[in-house]
Amino acid sequence: MGRLVVDSTHPAKAVEIDDQLYCKLYFDEKKLLKEKGHVSKIYIAKASTASGNHLQHARVKHGKTFTDEPSPKLSSWSTKCSNGESSTSQYEINCDLALFLCRDLLPLELVDKRGFQEFCGKNFLMEMPTSRTTACTALSDVYLVLKGKVKSLLQSSISGTLMMDGWTDKHQCSQYCAKRYSFVDKWMLTLALLPVESHTAHSLKMFVKSVISEYLPHSRRMLLFNTTDGEANMKLPSKLLGYQHIDCMAHCLHLLLTVDSFNRVSELVLLAEKCKAIVHTLHFKDHLINTEQTISNDTEVLDKVALVVETLSSDSDNPVLTTDFGVDEEAEFAAEHSQDHVPTSSHHHSLKTSVCTRWNSMLAMTESVLDLQKPAAEALKKDWKERPMFGRR
């Protein structure tokens, strides 16, 4: 990475174009000539960008791998983090914040929220970083430290199972592949999750080789297995690399329950299609569900109160009236002993969508529709009324 200058043949007269960093590999490989001179094709980054981003760009786009040792301040933060010591600099605060967001699986945009900023400004003297700073600098440095610890941990591994899966996102149709390693010391680590050119056997083979060479350089002395689903492009890399293949039991169970069982019952298929249609219609309208659920809960409470009053006043000799119970105990006793009382409990507070590769997600979707049957029905009615006439089907 370096800066672009004008008239670089005369260092004394060289003038930098801007303060951005440009990828030198594009010029070395003459990418500009192949791309008809489009400068926009060059990888550009700010000077404050962490080196981990540059290394990932070189590995993914140019196929080049460089070693990068943690800086002294990053090593110092890692030692403090391991010993539970508090941070003493703005850089260490940024790293601690990035680690906190990753551990709790919180969005990076949290640091830009008004409430979080006010809380930190009131209770801490140091300035909180923005989400961009957290993502582009601190997160990459934290990743570099954890990556070193994972490599050190894997040095003692003598056998394990490599698990691989691939998918394509629906937004940009980018293809991804993930490699996970499981070994006896009760560890299961995700080693890599990167975009790949394609899901062909050759492309996946090169992906697996690059991950193994980086994390398991002593793999030739290890006993390795490979676990994937039953797709041919997933099984073939195991054969090409010489690893014994083991079918994924979760995938086998999924095929058994869906292809061989579920899809053969027309009533279940029709039920799933109806549930998917409901979830698809109300996918971005949770506020309607919440409103109708609140109304339904209030109505249910009022019905219970009316039932209790009717039960207690129906018979003047009712034993409940002659006991020493309080008012609350009388109402509870009458409601529990009423023939029409049916306890209701819902553990789903929102509609769940199904995933085509997870059979249990279809079960969760059906349960959520049943739990929210009344609120969903009312929300569908309101959605229908709010639609314009030409948009109704």
Image (tube, rainbow, N blue to C red):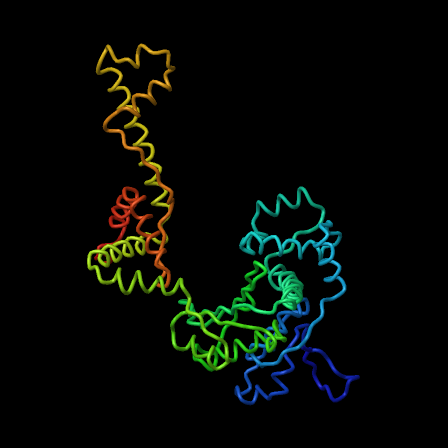
Q: Residue at x 55, y 80 (%)?
A: 41
Above or below, 187 relative to 34: above
Tally the numbered discs: 0
Residue 191 placement (x, y as % from top left)? 56, 67
Q: Nearer the viewer, residue 213 or 126?
A: 213
Q: Is residue 257 left or right of residue 120?
A: left
**Image quarter of residue 235:** bottom left
Q: In the picture, which quadrant includes the C terminus?
A: bottom left
Q: Position of residue 87 (x, y in %)?
A: 73, 51
Q: Residue 343, image x and y in percent?
A: 31, 33
Locate the N terminus and report the quarter of the image it occupies: bottom right
Which residue occupies 52% across, 68% down?
Answer: 161
The answer to whether residue 281 is left or right of residue 86 is left
Residue for point 27% across, 48% down:
380
- In the figure, 212 relative to 30: above or below? above
Above or below 194: residue 340: above
